[in-house]
């Protein structure tokens, strides 16, 4: 064999051996990184400084945007004077209070105050993010009887509130947007005028609805294309001693939809039940209905003629599965 060929073969063998040797000692490929929005987290807030954060807002903003798994913020007992915002990018967020009466989020803005707030900007807590949950928390607007003053304003879709209190006077709970589905279980909601209002599809199950003055409980603004508006299932309607003549609701917008099913109604509920907001035309468009309720305020003899008494078959439509069907079904967990 010619010398040049032998040298070439020798060099090739040495190169191949070097490559093989290098491959044997090379570091393994790094494992794929797990995105932080796929890792559940838990933060703690304590007003006394014993947690990771002193304010709820700080903890909310510390959570990764667009979480796809639960992010839980545990809140220790305390008074949190905050105007709290849950932005739209904060998804899958849970505020878990140590106790319902011990964790109080409170503020005092109201429509027409010195800062020129309106009903839409007065809220103590405003929820914009989807898949929000709150448990064991009191939401309070402390402004007093000065006009519209929202304690809780909810815009996000698939919002759940369990064992919470919403305290205020006029416009306590604002169910803000048409495409927002909201579920309230075992909550206490109190106020004076229109204190549960808005255009969302919302279910209140086993809730106590407490009227503080002679006025109206609900003021729905349901859109015509919505099959459901505000639905009260197995609730209890109570009142302060000075509240003796209270309407179940009046239509903030013409196509308001509000239904009470198997609800215990105190004697403070007016015999006529419903009011047309001073517009006879609303009687042809609003959908107000009841079924199977009990108590002195549930007597149907004096109800306005344009309200409805559901049949048993019609009442069976009012399941969480049907009410929250939407474009993509949602079934909030019952606890």
Image: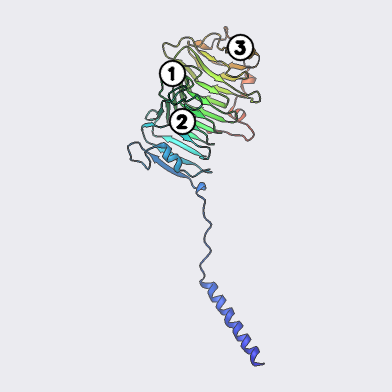
**Residue 227 seen in the figure:** yes
Instruction: Say how many tags the image has.
Output: 3
Dot 3 and dot 2 residues touching (CB under 8 Å): no
Q: CA distance from mark 1 to mark 2?
A: 18 Å
**Residue 206 seen in the figure:** no
Taking the spot 65% from the left edge, 88% from the top edge, the residue there is: 5
**Picture layout, residue 52 above or below residue 261:** below
Q: Disc 3 or 2, which lies upstream in sequence?
A: 2
Tag in front: 1 or 3? 1
Q: Quadrant of the N terminus?
A: bottom right
Tag in front: 1 or 2? 1
Looking at the rendered structure, the secondary structure element under dot 2 is strand
Disc 3 residue crowd, few under 14, some 14–19, many 20+, Cα 10 Å: few
Q: Disc 1 or 2, which lies upstream in sequence?
A: 2
Q: Measured from the top left, where is residue 73 in percent x and y? A: 43, 39
For the rendered model, the colour scheme is rainbow
> In the rendered image, which residue does mark 3 sit on?
279
> In the rendered image, which residue does mark 1 sit on?
146
Q: CA distance from mark 3 to mark 2?
A: 33 Å
Q: Measured from the top left, where is residue 175 in percent x and y? A: 54, 26
**Picture layout, residue 220 above or below residue 90:** above
Looking at the rendered structure, the secondary structure element under dot 1 is loop
Q: Residue furthest top?
A: 302
Along the line of sight, the residue nearer the viewer: 315 or 27 = 27
Q: CA distance from mark 1 to mark 3?
A: 26 Å
**Picture layout, residue 238 above or below residue 59:** above
Residue 125 tag number? 2
Q: Disc 1 or 3, which lies upstream in sequence?
A: 1
Residue 179 tag number? none
Taking the spot 64% from the left edge, 20% from the top edge, the residue there is: 314
Q: Measured from the top left, where is residue 83 in percent x and y? A: 43, 31
């Amino acid at each position: 064999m010619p010398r040049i060929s032998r040298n070439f073969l020798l060099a090739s063998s040495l190169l191949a051996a070097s490559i093989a040797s290098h491959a044997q000692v090379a570091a393994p490929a790094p494992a794929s990184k797990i995105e932080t929005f796929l890792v559940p987290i838990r933060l703690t807030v304590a007003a006394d400084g014993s947690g990771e954060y002193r304010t709820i807002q700080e903890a909310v903003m510390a959570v990764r945007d667009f979480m796809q798994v639960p992010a839980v913020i545990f809140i220790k007992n305390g008074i949190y004077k905050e105007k709290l915002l849950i932005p739209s990018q904060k998804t899958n967020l849970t505020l878990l209070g140590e106790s319902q009466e011990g964790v109080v989020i409170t503020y005092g803005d109201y429509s027409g105050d010195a800062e020129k707030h309106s009903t839409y900007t007065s809220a103590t807590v405003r929820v914009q993010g989807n898949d929000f949950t709150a448990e064991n928390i009191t939401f309070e607007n402390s402004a007093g009887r000065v006009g519209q003053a929202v304690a809780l304003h909810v815009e996000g879709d698939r919002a759940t509130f369990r064992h919470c209190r919403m305290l205020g006077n006029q416009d306590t709970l604002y169910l803000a947007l048409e495409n927002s589905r909201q579920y309230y279980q075992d909550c206490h909601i109190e106020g004076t005028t229109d204190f549960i209002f808005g255009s969302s599809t919302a279910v209140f199950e086993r809730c106590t609805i407490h009227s503080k003055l002679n006025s109206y409980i609900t003021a729905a603004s349901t859109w015509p294309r919505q099959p459901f508006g505000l639905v009260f299932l197995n609730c209890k309607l109570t009142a302060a001693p000075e509240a003796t003549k209270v309407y179940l609701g009046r239509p903030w917008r013409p196509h308001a939809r509000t239904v009470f099913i198997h609800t215990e109604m105190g004697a403070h509920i007016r015999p006529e039940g419903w009011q047309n907001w001073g517009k006879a035309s609303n009687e042809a468009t609003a959908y107000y209905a009841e079924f199977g309720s009990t108590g002195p305020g549930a007597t149907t003899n004096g109800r306005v003629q344009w309200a409805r008494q559901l049949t048993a078959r019609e009442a069976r439509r009012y399941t969480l599965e049907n009410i929250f069907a939407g474009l993509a079904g949602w079934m909030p967990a019952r606890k």
